[in-house]
Amino acid sequence: MKTKIPRDNLHMNWRNVDGYNKAFNFFISPREPGKTDTTWWEKIYTGWVENKRPWAYLVRTAVEITDAAILDIENNINKWAIDPVELLYKKGEFKDGIVDVYIKEELFIRIYSINVQLRRLKMAKLANIGGIFFDEYIIDPKSQEKYIPNEWFKIKELYNTLRREYQGKGFLKAYFAGNPYSLFLPAFIGLNVNVNDLRKDTWVHDSTLTHYKFRDGIEFDDYTYKCKPNIYTNDLCVVEWGTLNPILKRYLKEKNPLYMFDEEYNSYALEGNAVNDKHIKLGELPNNYSLNFVIKIDGKFVGIFKNNYLDDREDRFFCKFLDEVGARRTIYCFDFSEMVSRSILMSLDDRSKLHRFKEAMRRSAVAFEDVNVYYYCVEVFKNLWAH
């Protein structure tokens, strides 16, 4: 589709991900590669112009649906559109958490707050849907952000509701974009993503020197680069951990002083590292550890293994998810809703039995199978610390 200013090949696209033809598609990356911009222009608006199939746009809470948020979508489109568009909507729908947005008289997107009642989500079908987009999916716990309770289940239920109205070829596709503050995501857990297998894209250059000149006057000579994607996939989803084209990275460093002088911010914003996970002690279960407790939390069984040959230089415990639990093993729960056969609701006496584990967590003397197990154990630790 023609644009009023040329699009370049320095920013991201969904081609690598789309090649795997999965229902759930993720692109995580540092800031600046154009995830939002590319999705609204190339995926959503261009497709809508051709087939008039509206998209579902997901947010977590109704308070995120604002005039400014919709204007930002409009500006993303009008940056490229030869004929500017105006997005029309009823402001009174904001408080309800489900908002229809039109271009002229035709439905363009429907915004869904997934925190509304599940019954309302299941009733809000979208005829002839084109796709689903959830932008800024990954939250930053250090900024006091939180995933909503039962989040992935609600997304699955909404997906199944919308899928019934899909008339295109293959799967109805859902796209998730975000900055990897952490690799602990409800979606990754629900889709059985092995986060230990995720790898970032890399770039290689050839011997061709090119003169790059940007619209704001910044220019320099550098090589041309080609991306070598490292794609993770399983039966349900595909994940690309994108990185910045070195040319774009160099341009941004010259344009933004934060990227030159703030190393910690640079690690997240330019390098795309999962900065909140860097302190987590990861590994594999050592031979001299035996299963000490099983905790059930958020539908998952977490095995807490104790070091049988304690040495001050070694970790006291190791934690990992368990696929099954032995018939004689007692499962401890913190919440009545987690109760299953052979489980007991954890009493004050039971909590005291986990005192050593609590102290080991406090002293960082615990290792974990992956980051997901770590964050579940943090919730266990909080429960223990409260008593």
Image (cartoon, rainbow, N blue to C red):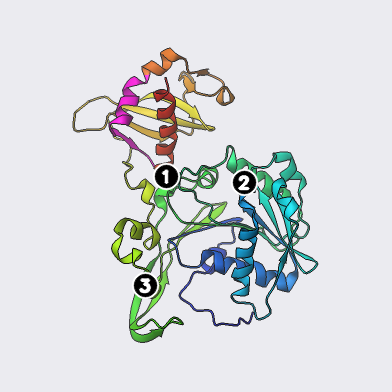
**Residue 114 at x, y = what percent?**
64, 46
Q: Which mark is residue 246?
A: 3
Real-space Cα distance between discs 3 and 1?
Answer: 29 Å
Residue where numbered disc 1 is placed: 142
Q: Neighbour class for label 3 at 10 Å: few (<14), some, many (≥20)?
A: many
The image shows residue 251, relative to residue 363, as above or below, that is below
Q: Can the viewer see residue 19?
A: no
Residue where numbered disc 2 is placed: 61
Q: Is residue 241 left or right of residue 147?
A: left
Residue at image position (64%, 55%) is: 66
Name the foreground residue: 122 vs 107: 107
The amino acid type of the residue labelled 2 equals Thr
Name the foreground residue: 14 vs 250: 250
Decide which of tag 1 and tag 2 comes sooner along the chain. 2
In the rendered structure, does residue 341 fall within the stretch colored magenta?
no
Helix, strand, or loop for circle 1? helix
Q: Which label sits in the foreground, 3 or 1?
A: 1
Helix, strand, or loop for circle 2? loop
Q: Is residue 6 left or right of residue 141?
A: right
